[in-house]
Amino acid sequence: MSDSVPTEVERRDFIFIATTAAAAIGTGLAAWPLVDQMNPASDTRASSSLDVDVSKIPVGGEIRVLIGGKPFFIRRRTEAEIAAANAVNFDRLPDPETDDARLRPRRDGTLNPAILITSGVCTHLGCVPVGPNQGAVGDYGGWYCPCHGSHYDISGRIRKGPAPLNLPVPDYVYLTDDLVTISI
């Protein structure tokens, strides 16, 4: 036999390798839709962020928004509220965090202490606290969870009660000085 003519064993090996490769590719192509359907739907992905014009919130006012079915508090704090938040000895808090650490920088890198954005879910059992706009500020001028008695200050930091952590601060960025995109 000549070297240019493949032997029967070489042909069988090639057919076996080609068939196995085609089967593996076919299995991958068939499995992809099954794996891809586990990703969130496009409408769910679209509802995982929200642009908010914070200039429309009056001083001392608060709005509540839902993003992906979760509540968030956006508050325009007064000068007195900002001063009270900064006057706290944060080392003595159950979950120590400065007021500035709970803010995100604007596009120019400066902080806007007037705007506070937090999750609206109590860190104890997931209730939605009431706040200054509902007339129930708790013992520290912020939010109060009437279900189990957690008290948060005007910076969303836990001060008293069973909640173990501060109200979480979501990811958000300032697109302009007045427009904020909140993402979960």
Image: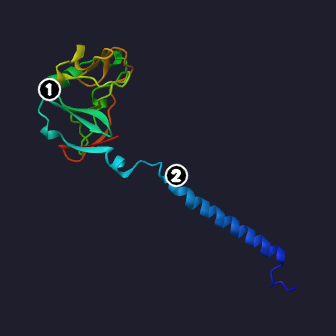
Where residue 68 appears, as percent x and y from the top left, is 33, 40
Where residue 160 appears, as percent x and y from the top left, is 32, 14
Q: How many marks?
A: 2
Q: List the residue tagged with mark 2.
A: 35
> What amino acid type should be assigned to the residue bearing mark 2?
Val
Would you place residue 152 above or below residue 53 in this image?
above
Q: Which mark is residue 14?
A: none
Q: Nearer the viewer, residue 11 or 90?
A: 11
Quadrant in which residue 29 is drawn:
bottom right
Where residue 70 appears, as percent x and y from the top left, is 32, 35
Mark 2 Cα-neighbour bin, 10 Å: few <14, some 14–19, many ≥20 = few
Q: How is the image coloured?
A: rainbow
Tell me what residue is drawn at x 12 percent, y 31 percent: 59
Cα gap from disc 2 to disc 1, whole angstroms = 52 Å
Where residue 135 appears, as percent x and y from the top left, is 16, 19
Q: Which mark is residue 79?
A: 1
Tell me what residue is drawn at x 81 percent, y 84 percent: 5
Tell me what residue is drawn at x 34 percent, y 50 percent: 43
Marks 2 and 1, the one that precedes in the sequence: 2
Tell me what residue is drawn at x 36 percent, y 21 percent: 96
Quadrant in which residue 67 is drawn:
top left
Quadrant in which residue 114 is drawn:
top left
Mark 1, secondary structure of its residue: helix
Would you place residue 112 above or below residue 123 in this image?
below
Mark 1 Cα-neighbour bin, 10 Å: few <14, some 14–19, many ≥20 = few
